[in-house]
Image (cartoon, rainbow, N blue to C red):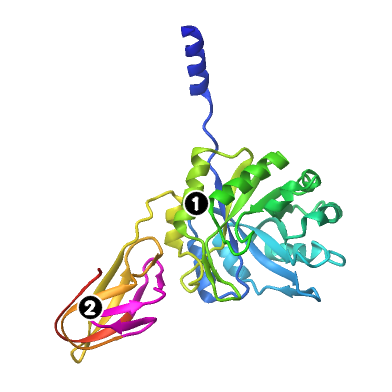
Amino acid sequence: MLLLALVLACSRGSEAPPTPLTHEAYVWQRDWSPELSGALTDVLPELGALRVLARERSGPTRTPVDIGVDVEALARSGRDVVAVMRVDGTAPLDGISLEEVAVHARAWKARGVRVRGIEVDHDCATPALPRYADWLDQERARLQGQGLTLSITALPTWASSPDVRRLVSIPDDVVLQVHAVRAPTLFTPEEARRFVESWSTATGRPFRVALPTYRVRLRDGTRLSAEPRDVARFLTGLRERPVPGLTGVLWFRLGHRADPEAWSPPTLATVLRGEPLTPRLTPRLVDAGGGTRDIVIENTGHVDAEAPARLTLTGNLEVLDGVGGYAPRGASLVARTPPRLRAGERRVVGFVRGTEVSLAVP
């Protein structure tokens, strides 16, 4: 028994640790701004390739739309790049070809971009997977000899189809989307875990997972947000209990300072590195001249965070008013929907005039 215990202990000790997950990011903006172009020169070192939306086919007429990508910025980034074509899930694939995005990939490569391959983002209905697989098979044959890898995005619901194994055997790379799958939920770590485990069992092949970094407003006005703590909890679970076949993470999407609906780069870095998600919001009074002081909230931490709903002032208040969603209520400023401040952001939420005024957060 002692010998058996020693053998088992040695065998456990000799097991290789799981390979760390790779990290890449989607650049999904349809309107390229100078801020986005500039952000590509300062991408997190942990991020490898950039998967860039290049062409779309959507709507009832499936009108093709080319994205005005800043190719020079992609070249300066020095990153591997995957050119992506999005095809609306409700649109049939008749008359659509991967050559539409491959032509962009070749053009980018000729201008110095390190193009690795192409990707198709097509959220087709599960019963349509056989036709989708046939289309992928034909299109892949046409790409032979071009030196481009082929990637597809996938939905968790496809795991229930008997045709999923054939489908995932065609591309070189599969990215499982676990966000915005079931309305009105954007992301929960428990559901995402079930999705990746089910996909792993159903396909038996390597895959990556796409995780959200954004907020979105539904048609009824409801705001949904991918909370850093939820995504971090999912990643912690993957580190502690790896899922067979899961090789990497795709972050959707790469944010920048002019994109308030996506995580700031410091927040992405904090979650990706598994660092503590400790918010640091500092309210203070700033002299604005003429006896008036601005009421300012500054996020001095590395994590995007919601501002306090109430700011309380003391002293002899002569004038008190709020801006940006804050309104005076007695000696306080109150926001029904507190704003979210990105890491490093400073925002004026009101102004006050009086004597011996001080500010505190209850």
Please provide percent x and percent y for residue 246.
Answer: 61, 43
Quarter where residue 334 is shown: bottom left
Seen at 42% across and 55% down, the residue is: 270
Instruction: Tell how many labels.
Output: 2
Q: In the picture, which quadrant includes the C terminus? A: bottom left
Estimate the spatial distance between the alpha carbons at disc 1 and disc 2, rounded to whole Å: 38 Å
Location of residue 233 with respect to 324 vertically, above or below: above
Residue 76 quadrant: bottom right
**Residue positioned most to the left:** 356
Helix, strand or loop at mark 2: strand
Looking at the image, is mark 1 or mark 2 earlier in the sequence? 1
Write the residue at 68% across / 61% down: 83
Q: Identify the residue at image location x=49%, y=38%.
A: 240
Q: Secondary structure at mark 1?
A: loop
Q: Is residue 244 left or right of residue 265?
A: right
Question: Is residue 82 found left or right of 185 in the rendered image?
Answer: right
Name the amino acid, label 2: Leu
In front of the other: 219 or 94: 219
Identify residue for label 2.
285
- Label 1 belongs to which residue? 46
- Residue 279 at what x, y percent from top left? 34, 60
Q: Is residue 298 above or below residue 228?
A: below
Compared across the picture, whether 199 is left or right of 352 comes to right
Q: Which residues are magenta?
A: 322-348
Q: Position of residue 8 (x, y in %)?
A: 51, 16
